[in-house]
Amino acid sequence: MGFAGEQLLETERGVQKIAQVDPEGLIKVLNGKWFSYFHKRVVGEGETLVIDLESGKTIECSAGQRIMTVHGFASAGDLRIGEMLAGTNTNYKPPKPSEREIREDLDDLYEDLPMAVKESLSVDKVIRVRKDKYVKDLYCLFVPRWHCFQVSSGVIVSNLNSLEGVGNE
């Protein structure tokens, strides 16, 4: 799982392509606050999907990349037209580190929210998912504890569980 190198991220240093971000820095997490990340230049290679959004922005990632919808995390390959993608939730209070992983907590939380609340958390909608014809290098960030971060479209995405033993330096 991962993103094509052209995918834009908003870091504390401004909007950058994921292939060019610094090895360490700050990125926005689910509650809208800046949190430290670690970046591995290439985590693998594979086919990518281009997800066209209602806002005119795109997300280019592998089919297995998990993206936050208003119902919880879903694989990019499973997204449907009209799917509402979720962004920052400033009211979210994460569990204590020893209790459970934040991604699990989010899936349970979003599943139980009323539809009106889910709609208020939506930052964009999927208008098309298309397969790119080229195999590309894939990139990702590792955000300890949160395991998710915000891409430049404002959508929250999941990260790898670890950068150990993947890709090239």
Image: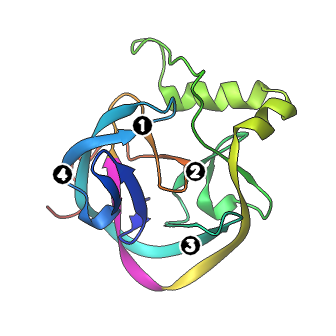
The coloring applied to the image is: rainbow
**First reached walking from the N terminus: tag 2 or tag 1:** 2
The residue depicted at 23 percent of the width and 43 percent of the height is 25
Given residues 34 and 141, the one toward you in this image is 34
Any mark on residue 67, and which?
Answer: 2
User: Disc 4 on helix, strand or loop?
Assistant: loop
Return the residue found at the far bottom: 133
- Tell me which amino acid carries mark 2: Ile
User: Disc 1 on helix, strand or loop?
Assistant: loop
The residue depicted at 44 percent of the width and 59 percent of the height is 1
Any mark on residue 165, and which?
Answer: none
Residue at label 1? 147
The local crowd at label 3, few if under 14, some if 14 to 19, many if 20 or more residues have their Cα within 10 Å, is many
**Quarter assignment of residue 149:** top left
Residue at label 3? 49
Residue 74, x across and y down, in percent: 64, 49
Please state if 73 lies on the left or on the right of 38 as rendered: right
Q: Marks 1 and 4, how far apart in space? A: 17 Å
User: Disc 3 on helix, strand or loop?
Assistant: strand
Residue numbers of the magenta segment: 134-141
Residue at label 4? 23
- Tell me which amino acid carries mark 1: His
Q: Is residue 98 above or below residue 90?
A: above
- Tell me which amino acid carries mark 3: Leu
Q: Is residue 166 in view?
A: no
